[in-house]
Image: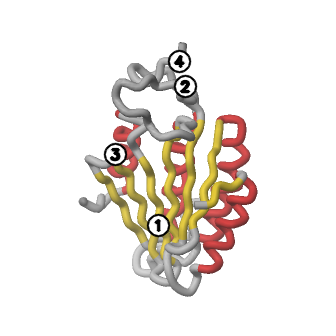
Amino acid sequence: MPYYQTWEEFARAAEKLYLADPMKVRVVLKYRHCDGNLCIKVTDNAVCLQYKTDQAQDVKKIEKLHGKLMRLMVSKETHSGSMETD
Amino acid sequence: MVLLENDSFLTELTRLFQKCRTSGSVAITLKKYDGRTKPVPKKGHPESFEPADNKCLIRASDGKKKISTVVSTKEVIKFQMAYSNLLRAHIDGLKKKDKKSKSKKTKATQ
């Protein structure tokens, strides 16, 4: 389970993974104040992408990505396959 | 696992962050939710369930206490604003980058 070195790569891979199968993917955010670090993980139980940071400047990026994925999840997307409600 | 309303969830999440300031971690999980309340039926049984497409499940835990909430399209805007503010307010123990050696850049990300 590799930790990505650059935020850019992680963000791109995470969004791609989510769009491939929205129902499977989950996003986990773990914050440790005592150690002063934040870790974000995006996985579909087959692939696991992780990014860790102790920099305050990354908090905003992580929180934005989190919000973006949240909005993707609640938006009614017309995606092929799975859910057909007739 | 306690399922809460969006507002109660945010209040409890604030408490989790405050509790874990001296030790421990706060884990938040976000996942797309299709509104199931019953387990997936076995093969051969008809799936008498219409999946909803506009909800997501948010869980939070400090290792001991677990809370969760469901957010749907109507609530997401309000929830996301409050949630972002909450994260930014509490996730503040991280290192601030100040490069004294090279060029003096005062808070580039604003």
Give the residue number, with chain letter if any, for mark 3.
Answer: A44
Give the residue number, with chain letter if any, for mark 1.
Answer: A30
Labelled pair 4, 2 in contact (Cβ < 8 Å): yes
Which chain does tag 2 point to? Answer: B
Labelled pair 3, 1 in contact (Cβ < 8 Å): no
Labelled pair 3, 4 in contact (Cβ < 8 Å): no
Labelled pair 4, 1 in contact (Cβ < 8 Å): no
Mark-to-mark CA distance, 4 and 1: 36 Å
User: Which of the two discs, 2 and 1, sits closer to the camera?
Assistant: 2
Give the residue number, with chain letter if any, for mark 4.
Answer: A85
Where residue B59 sits in the image (x, y, percent)? 55, 57
Amino acid type at circle 2 is Glu
Which chain does tag 1 point to? Answer: A
**Which residue is situated farthest in the top direction here?**
A86
User: Which of the two discs, 4 and 1, sits closer to the camera?
Assistant: 4
User: What is the quadrant of residue B67 in the picture?
Assistant: bottom right
Q: Residues within 10 Å of mark 2 (few under 14, many from 20)?
A: few
The reply to whether label 3 and label 4 mark residues of one chain is: yes
Q: Secondary structure at mark 2?
A: loop
Give the residue number, with chain letter if any, for mark 2.
Answer: B50
Q: Secondary structure at mark 3?
A: loop
Residue B105 in sight in this render:
no
Mark-to-mark CA distance, 4 and 2: 6 Å
Point out the tag, 3 or 1, that comes first from the N-terminus: 1
User: Which of the two discs, 3 and 1, sits closer to the camera?
Assistant: 3
Labelled pair 2, 1 in contact (Cβ < 8 Å): no
Amino acid type at circle 1 is Lys
Mark-to-mark CA distance, 3 and 1: 17 Å
- In the image, A81 versus A33, the foreground residue is A81
- How many numbered dots are placed on residues in this image? 4
Where residue A48 sits in the image (x, y, percent)? 30, 53
Residue at 42 percent of width and 65 percent of height: A39
